[in-house]
Every structure is written in C-alpha cells, then in structure tokens.
Image (cartoon, rainbow, N blue to C red):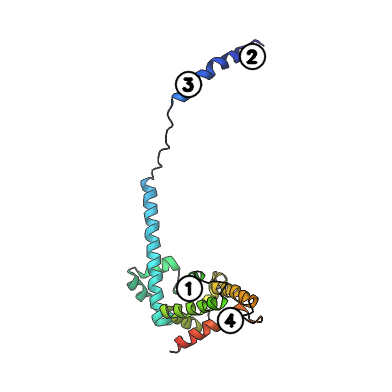
Amino acid sequence: MAFNMVSSAQKVVIEPDSKKASAGKKAESPRPVRKTPAQKATRGAQVRAHKTRDAILRAATRVFARNGFTEGKIESISKLSGTHDRMIYYYFGSKAQLFVEVLETTYQKMNEAAAAIPIDLDDPVGALTAVVNFVWRYYLDHPEFITLLNSENLLKGKHIKKSVRASQLSSPAVAILDQVLRSGVEKKLFREDMRARDLYIEIAALGYFYLSNH
C-alpha cells in the first residue's frame, strides 16, 4: 500500500515537468535520407543499362524491319545502336529472343495508340469511322509494323509463338469496336450479327493487304 502511494505521488510531480519539457521542444523536421556512394553508383548503372537496352531494341527494330529476321545481322544492330555484339547477347540472350521482344514492343506500341482512339458512343457511325481511320493512319505512319509482320509470317509465326506476352497483346480496338457495335445496334444503325473481332480483322486486312502489296 505504501508503494502505491509513493508511485502516485511521483506521477503527480513528474507529469507536469514532462509536459513542460515536451512543450519547450520544437518540432524537428525529418532529416533527408542521403544515398551512399554505392547506392548512387547502382542507380547510375541501372539507368545506363536501361538506355543501352532501349538503344539496342530501337536499332533492332530498324534492322529487322529493313532486312527481315534472317538477313538482319547482329553486327548491323550493334553498329546502329552504338554498342557491341556481346551486349546484345547479354541483354537478350539470342538473336531470336531479340526479335521476339521487337515484335512484342511493336504490338504494344500499337495497342497503346489504339487505347487512346477518341470515340463517341452516342455517334456509333462516327466512332466506327474513327477506328477505321486510326488503323489506316497507323499503318501509314509505322511502315515497320507491316514489314516486321511480313517477316514473321514468312517464318510461320515461330517467334511470336515463343512470346510469353502474346496472349496479353490483343488489340484494345477489338474491345472498342464491341462497344461501338452495341451502341449501333441499340440505335438500330448496325445489324446484330456482327462480331467485333471479325470486324477488326476486316478493317486490319483492308489496310494491311493494300499497303503490303503496294
């Protein structure tokens, strides 16, 4: 009992002092975390590696688009990218895997552009026209898309079959067309038996066949 009484008295005396002490302290702003030289060096190496890899990928796209996979030489790619042959094998493993990533990147860029197609579902005819114009304009502005596709088709698609991302590269234009068709059917402007994927193949084929055989 005596212990409890002493403890209570101590609390009464100590608590006001601690409050004054804490009130007298100014709030200290957190100090910025400084990176060590090793961390800075690691970050710099990552940036350089990323730039080197991108340079190789861009150069490979140009070389493969111009010469195809078979005639596209590693030496040409390293020269154009300002790197060395060994760097290409270091980052991509093989010429075939580099071509796979070129195809993936090419499809991805078109998908990103397709996702930004401006459409107005209240005007399904105008929206459908916008999709057709987009595909045609994209083929004109990116001739490498067609030549790379031609090269892969000649090889019976053996590289794209190795792509782990191929199943994720379905064009957003198909989903957009699905919405457009639904809107057109609701407004009794489009027939009901048209599938978005079939329509996209027709749109793509009209532009692709014309330009690839121009």
Q: Residues within 10 Å of mark 3 (few under 14, many from 20)?
A: few
Residue placed under numbered mark 1 in the picture: 110
Q: Secondary structure at mark 3?
A: helix
Tell me the number on the disc at residue 199.
Answer: 4
Tell me the number on the disc at residue 20.
Answer: 3
When asked about the image quadrant of residue 29, the answer is top left
Residue at x-position 35% and y-position 76%: 76
Residue placed under numbered mark 2 in the picture: 4
Identify residue type, mark 2. Answer: Asn
Task: Give the mark count.
Answer: 4
Depth check, mark 1 against mark 4: the one in front is 4
In what quadrant of the picture does the N terminus appear?
top right
Residue at x-position 54% and y-position 71%: 120
Q: Nearer the viewer, residue 63 or 190?
A: 190
Identify residue type, mark 3. Answer: Lys
Q: Nearer the viewer, residue 25 or 129?
A: 129
Is there any visible trace of residue 12 in the rendered image?
yes
From mark 3 to mark 4, how far is it between C-alphas?
77 Å
Instruction: Name which of mark 3 and mark 4 comes first in the sequence.
Output: 3
Instruction: Name which of mark 2 and mark 4 comes first in the sequence.
Output: 2
Residue at x-position 48% and y-position 73%: 110
* Residue sitting at the far bottom: 214
Instruction: Name which of mark 1 and mark 4 comes first in the sequence.
Output: 1
